[in-house]
Amino acid sequence: MLQRGLLPDFSAEVIGQTNSIAKAAAASDPSLRDLRRLLWASIDNDDSLDLDQLSVAEQLPDGAVKILVAIADVDAIAKKGSAIDDHARTNTTSVYTAAQIFPMLPEKLSTDLTSLADRKDRLAIVIEFEVSGDGEVGKSDIYRAAVTNRAKLAYNSVAAWLDGAGPAPTPISAVPGLDQNLRLQDRVAQAMKARRHQHGALTLETIEARPVFDGDSLRDLQADQKNRATELIEDFMIGANGVVARYLEQRGFPALRRVLRSPERWARIVELARDLGGRLPPRPDSRALQEFLDERRQADSARFPDLSLSVVKLLGRGEYVVEFPGQPVAGHFGLAVNDYTHSTAPNRRFPDLITQRLLKAALSGTPSPYSSDELNDLAGHCTDQEDNASKVERQVRKSAAALLLESHVGERFDGIVTGASEKGTWVRIDHPAAEGRVVKKYKGFDVGDHVTVELVDTDVERGFVDFEGVRKS
């Protein structure tokens, strides 16, 4: 982390400032709405305590559904220019490694006082939008409110219940009416997802490796995959982020947009499609790519995550840019949306905290808390630090993989090529979910190729997993 400009520890000043904060921010503005009675619930990872958002749905008489997303009012405690804010501004993100989590904000805040914690009264920014039966987002509003998380839920158990593969999680059963509300939210989210895909949003199922421990010993790296609960949150967050971007634009405020420009290696994506019997136009076209992805998922669902990973690598990385009033910026190619900011995770991402402060200024009619030059500098800094954090997470994940694989030297694995450039050729294997460099016999390997490799060496300290190419499938 230090080598990449990230601070692993909080300074004495940050610790002292944190210790002086005794309780969560309380409602003092009479304009705040009291929405604590609503059936708010959070859905996150099983072990997450830094809860940034809650959601609830309301059926409207005309058949539309009102969705309310509550975002933790982190700025109510983590003030701009404070020592706590300076640390967050340096790192710009929480860093999640297999060895340890390095939170952007002190845990006393992010997992308690600024978290939308289970059954706690908290201040929030509420993003409200109506969704028609076909998934189109209509009228919207944003305001400050007091909310209470009525049920802390986890993705996997909620998804199993929604799919009919498991019972309702206990927190759902304990809150009358919450089960029907969550099913309504699920129906709306699926309609929103379908509409986005009609407009060319990409359905990608990449595999994220999650460490599994037996006590203090690393036992495995298992793949996390999307399910209906993760999709519910994803689609509501995309909808909410779009509402925030448009709200700031309409009020003449700058916005820190998240963009993914046209793919860097579209020609290789076209080649991949051709190898699998598909056809794509010579110029980037998200709708055509989505149609191809749908066909491949139906034809070979088992290998679809591998294809997804290849496409993600070839699309290139997203970045933060500033949109000033009257100066449009690029949209998000992968999401097929033009209006997109990051606003829904202010405990974990600094761009979301910046957006929250801009939003609160717009709501109160006060000037922007950031100058144009400051926002431009922050956009570049946040992009760089997000990349640095990803590299740290990947480095530690490689060390974890090397630790798991060090007793398997000489064994062969099936994998997919995830990187091929002058810097090296990389392959991901499934069990454990790990990536390594092909140091021998990699000629002809390119992103998306299915290959067989032999493990030739590991180095836990440096996170090296070295393969030798055996053959292409």
Image: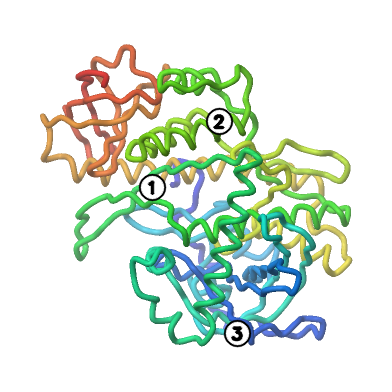
| Relative vertical location of residue 368 with respect to residue 291 in this rendering, above or below | below
Residue at disc 2, secondary structure = helix
**Quadrant in which the C terminus is drawn:** top left
Q: Which one is earlier in the sequence, the residue at label 2 or at label 1?
A: 1
Camera-side residue of 283 and 211: 283
Q: Residue at x 83, y 63 (%)?
A: 362
Camera-side residue of 120 and 10: 120
Residue 133 position by quadrant: bottom right
Q: Amino acid at mark 3?
A: Asp
- Name the residue that disc number 2 marks: 289
Spatial CA distance of label 2 from label 3 is 45 Å
- Left or right of 55 in this view: 412: left
Residue 414 visible (yes or no): yes
Residue 119 image point, x, y percent: 52, 84
Q: Which one is earlier in the sequence, the residue at label 2 or at label 3?
A: 3
- Name the residue that disc number 3 marks: 121
Mark 2 Cα shell of 10 Å, populated few (<14), some (14-19), many (≥20): many
Camera-side residue of 374 and 110: 110
Residue at disc 1, secondary structure = strand
| Relative vertical location of residue 270 with respect to residue 42 in this rendering, above or below | above
- Name the residue that disc number 1 marks: 208
Camera-side residue of 81 and 44: 44
Residue 381 image point, x, y percent: 63, 43
Residue 110 visible (yes or no): no
Q: Amino acid at mark 2?
A: Leu
Spatial CA distance of label 2 from label 1 is 22 Å
Residue 113 numbered tag? none
